[in-house]
Image (tube, rainbow, N blue to C red):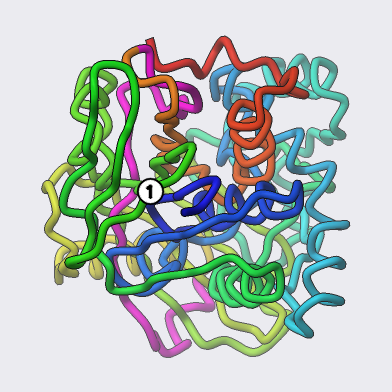
């Protein structure tokens, strides 16, 4: 018997399991497929909301908490596992017109912003073409990114070193409930018992905890396109009203992304490929001569507000949920895991839990 069973081995579930294990808990982690193969692998790895001053306060609180801790986490994971997650402070330029709101946001959360005219931005980021409705740029020099697949690999290796038992290809069939407690988790022909159960199953969470349907937890498909450019073509993340470009250290440039409500259909479409590539090449015309080497889709764990659900069930006192992170799961993961571990352990949360409660 474990102290905690965590259902879902995306980045949210793995970080939650890791935080609990670091506190001395015996943790079992159950994953329906391969660890981190869903939205954790498919996303862009931007450690910020795309246009942060438009994001809810509750989202910004978690992202900023993680922003302050990711550099150390990346270093610790590298030392533990030998895997470099390629955290880098690449900065992010946002091509929008609401610069006053951006300044207010920066003052609220203590992060730097610079407002640049299109001429200033063009000299800083050669090759970017401004649209008619965005003749300025808000530049956030402290925004960082990392490589999602490397983070998944590092977390999985870290969990192994901490003694967490991970079962992949182990889909949960049912969560057995009494009036006030979870009594067992049944998965892949086996029964798992624990003092506490954490559901961190991403887009699949509402299948296990039906009350999450009332929170709008459901899959939202996103498609991405990958260009193989030479290093230096683009130095910073660029965000527009309808998408973004992410430069990697090795020269690859990611273009994202679509948002489609298609239930659990994770297939790619020719329409999205055409739309994303057109968008990317209008923003950075030099991409027209750069080969596209990847096109994939993932299922984000959408919610009605974009604010994740991190809390204890009001019916079963040993059932917890950590889900609904939508487009910001990687950025919110450290704070979400910390808060979830505090709640499971029964200690005073280091982050206010009320805005994320399952009520």
Depth check: give the residue in front, 334 or 100: 334
In-image side of 105 versus 223 (left or right): right
The verdict on residue 299 being magenta is: yes
Residue 32 in picture, x, y percent from top left = 28, 64
Q: Which residue is mark 1?
A: 193
Query: In the structure shown, which secondary structural element does the residue marked by tag 1 occupy?
Result: loop
In-image side of 344 versus 241 (left or right): right
Up-down: is 306 above or below 42?
above
The image quadrant that residue 256 belongs to is: bottom left
Residue 352 in picture, x, y percent from top left = 68, 15
The image quadrant that residue 31 belongs to is: bottom left
Residue 198 in picture, x, y percent from top left = 44, 40
Quadrant (top left/top right/bottom left/bottom right) for the C terminus: top left
Residue farthest along the front direction in this orientation: 1
The verdict on residue 26 being magenta is: no
Up-down: is 34 above or below 99?
below
Depth check: give the residue in front, 25 or 331: 25
Depth check: give the residue in front, 338 or 62: 338
Q: Residue at x 45, y 50 (%)?
A: 6
Q: Residue at x 58, y 26 (%)?
A: 59
Q: Is residue 218 visible?
A: no
Q: Residue at x 78, y 69 (%)?
A: 77
Q: Which residues are magenta?
A: 285-314
């Amino acid at each position: 018997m474990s102290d905690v069973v965590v259902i879902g081995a995306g980045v949210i579930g793995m970080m939650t399991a890791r935080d609990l294990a670091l506190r001395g808990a015996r943790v079992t982690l159950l994953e329906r497929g391969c660890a981190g193969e869903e939205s954790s692998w498919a996303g862009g790895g931007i450690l910020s909301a795309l246009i942060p001053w438009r994001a809810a306060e509750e989202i910004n609180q978690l992202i900023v908490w993680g922003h302050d801790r990711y550099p150390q986490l990346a270093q610790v994971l590298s030392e533990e596992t030998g895997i470099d997650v390629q955290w880098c402070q690449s900065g992010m330029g946002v091509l929008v017109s609401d610069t006053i709101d951006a300044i207010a946001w920066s003052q609220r959360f203590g992060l730097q912003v610079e407002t640049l005219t299109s001429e200033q931005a063009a000299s800083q980021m050669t090759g970017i073409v401004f649209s008619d409705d965005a003749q300025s740029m808000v530049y956030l020099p402290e925004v960082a990114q990392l490589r999602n697949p490397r983070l998944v690999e590092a977390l999985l290796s870290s969990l192994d070193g901490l003694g967490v038992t991970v079962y992949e290809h182990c889909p949960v069939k049912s969560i057995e409930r009494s009036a006030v407690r979870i009594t067992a988790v049944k998965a892949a022909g086996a029964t798992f018992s624990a003092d506490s159960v954490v559901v961190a199953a991403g887009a699949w969470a509402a299948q296990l905890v039906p009350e999450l349907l009332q929170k709008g937890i459901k899959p939202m498909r996103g498609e991405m396109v990958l260009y193989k450019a030479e290093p230096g073509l683009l130095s910073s993340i660029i965000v527009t009203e309808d998408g973004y470009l992410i430069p990697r250290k090795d020269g690859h440039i990611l273009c994202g992304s679509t948002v489609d409500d298609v239930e659990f259909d994770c297939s790619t479409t020719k329409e999205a490929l055409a739309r994303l590539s057109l968008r990317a090449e209008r923003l950075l015309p030099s991409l027209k001569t750069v080969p596209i080497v990847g096109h994939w889709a993932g299922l984000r764990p959408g919610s009605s507000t974009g604010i994740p659900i991190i809390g204890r069930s009001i019916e079963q006192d040993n059932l917890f949920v950590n889900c609904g992170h939508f487009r910001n799961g990687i950025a919110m993961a450290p704070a979400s895991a910390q808060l979830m571990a505090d709640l499971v352990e029964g200690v005073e949360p280091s982050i206010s839990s009320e805005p994320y409660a399952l009520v």
